[in-house]
Image: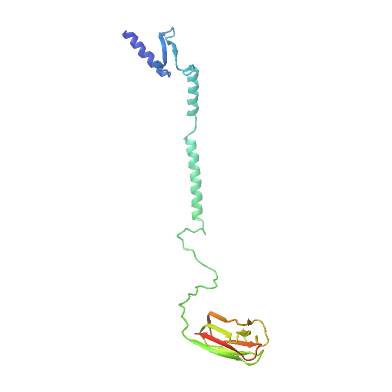
Amino acid sequence: MAQQSLTNVIINRILSLVGINIKDVTGRYTAEVNSNNALKVAMDSSSVAIGDATAANQTAEIGHLASIAGEDFATQTTLAALNALVTTLNGLVTAIKDTAGIKQIVDAVAVTGTFWQATQPVSGPVTPATTITEYSVTLTNVDTEYSQAIPDGTKKIFYMSTSGQPFRAAYATGKVATPTQPYEAVGAGVTCSDDGVSLTSKTIYFATDVAGDVIFLRCWT
């Protein structure tokens, strides 16, 4: 009985080594040593598929392992090639860094050349108008130039025909008596104004086709 139990243990061990669990064996199995001192196990049947643990399959597996072992995963040759690439890259970076004319981010960069304006003008605070001056300019004759000097520092100017007649206006002499561009042709009933200005030493000129028309003029300074 002891001998049979030892035999069973040995057989179970051998079967497990070749991938067969004793629970997969059905029926009776025997073991014997042949004339070549090889252990031979015989069994009635097994649920393991035929060919799962044959000598041919073992040879194939050995071949697969040998092919994996032959792969060059991290040999000295591979590492040397990578090191050469790193050395080349490091040389390129050093060359770029040391090349004259290439500046680092922290390097001072001189600004040279010709500039139309070194500094930009800064607008000061806007001073509101505090004085209003009003004028009546009588256009006695038709197609005749009449003028009115504008106070220095005028910020806004307004003018109109008091009778709603059309008339002509300009800031340059010789434009309104005989209409000559540029001038402003003001239609009947239309009022005019120039705002946001700063006038100095300016004169405005008027003329009309209706004798006796009166132009009302108001200036803010």
Who is closer to the viewer here, 17 or 219?
219
Is 179 left or right of 70, judged from the image as shown?
A: right
Q: Is residue 219 left or right of residue 7?
A: right
Taking 114 as reference, is 176 above or below it? below
Quadrant location, the N terminus: top left
Measured from the top left, where is residue 105 in percent x and y?
A: 46, 58
The residue at 31%/9% (across/down) is 2
Q: Judge by depth and name the residue closer to the eye, 125 or 98.
A: 125
Is residue 64 something that shows in the picture?
yes
Residue drawn at the location 50% of the way across and 43% of the way down: 85
In this figure, what is the number of numbered marks? 0
21 w.r.t. 169: above or below: above
Instruction: Name the residue located 36 percent from the left edge and 12 percent from the top edge.
Output: 8
Colour scheme in the image? rainbow
Residue 114, percent from left and from top: 55, 71
Residue 38: quarter of image: top left
Extreme residue in the left direction: 2
Residue 220 is situated, as x and y percent measured from the top left of the image, at 50, 84
Residue 38 visible in the shown view: no
**Image position of 15 with respect to 91: above or below:** above
Q: Position of residue 95 (x, y in %)?
A: 51, 52
54 vs 176, nearest the viewer: 176
